[in-house]
Amino acid sequence: MSLATLPLDHHVATGPRRPEPLEPDLLHDIAAGIATATTLWRPLVRHQADERRPVRLLATERYEVWVIGWLPGQRAELHDHGDAAGALLVVDGTLTEHTVTDDGLRSRVLPAGAAEDLPVGLVHEVVNEHDGPATSIHVYSPPLETMTRYDGTSFEPTFTEILYIEEPAISASADSVVRHPSLRG
């Protein structure tokens, strides 16, 4: 994922109006469908000691899918997903999610098979606090354009990143095979 940092008061011009996020159940269906297609994503997932490296599996105008390998200690520090909603599905290992609430941080352990809604406005971090590697599938709708990072103590925003489009690992001809039937036109 390529990033550029913007000042907090910077307005991101997104061009034409972006589509509304897909429904959470549909995002979870897409994640579950991708999870079963292990021959598509397993050869692409990266568990690297030097950095956590997400892989953009596929992208449509309405959603995108990422697979992320996590080694012990790797984390995605407090962030939101801009105007995108999402679903996170742990397919291997165990992750921990820390979510900002009115009362501070709420922590949840997410073993393999756990699925989480990522509603618009959610501020959270995901970390592998466990002994072995973990793998997760993330679906975002509409595709991510920005993410805001937050201070771990005050929970105040610190900066916003613009996410540059990364070519998906699965070609456009393959995405029609994995696209949910209700999205086919």
Image (cartoon, helix red, strand yellow):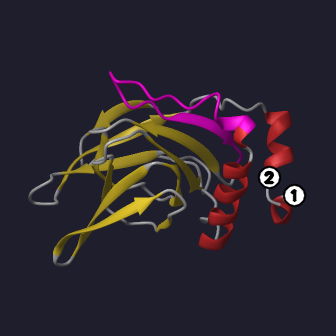
Residue shown at 80% from the left, 35% from the top: 172
Residue 164, horizontal then vertical, whole percent: 49, 32
Q: Is residue 104 above or below residue 165?
A: below
Quarter of image, res 38? top right
Residue 40, horizontal then vertical, whole percent: 73, 36
State the residue position of label 1. Answer: 184
Q: Considering the whole magenta stretch, tell me its main secondary structure.
A: loop
State the residue position of label 2. Answer: 179
Seen as rendered, the residue at the extreme right is: 185
Lower position in the chain sequence, tag 2 or tag 1: 2
Amino acid identity at mark 2: Arg
Evaluate whether residue 12 shows in this view: no
Residue shown at 36% from the left, 35% from the top: 71
Residue 18, horizontal then vertical, whole percent: 60, 56
Residue 126, horizontal then vertical, whole percent: 34, 52
Q: Secondary structure at mark 1?
A: loop
Does the magenta run of residues contain 41? yes
**Residue 175 vs residue 116: left or right?**
right
Question: From which residue to which does the magenta span run?
Answer: 39-61
Quarter of image, res 113? bottom right
Q: Nearer the viewer, mark 2 or mark 1?
A: 2
Residue shown at 85% from the left, 45% from the top: 176
Seen as rendered, the residue at the extreme bottom is: 102
Does the magenta run of residues contain 118? no
**Contact flag, marks 2 and 1 (Cβ < 8 Å):** yes
**Residue 151 vs residue 17: left or right?**
left
Q: Secondary structure at mark 2?
A: loop
Evaluate whether residue 13 shows in this view: yes
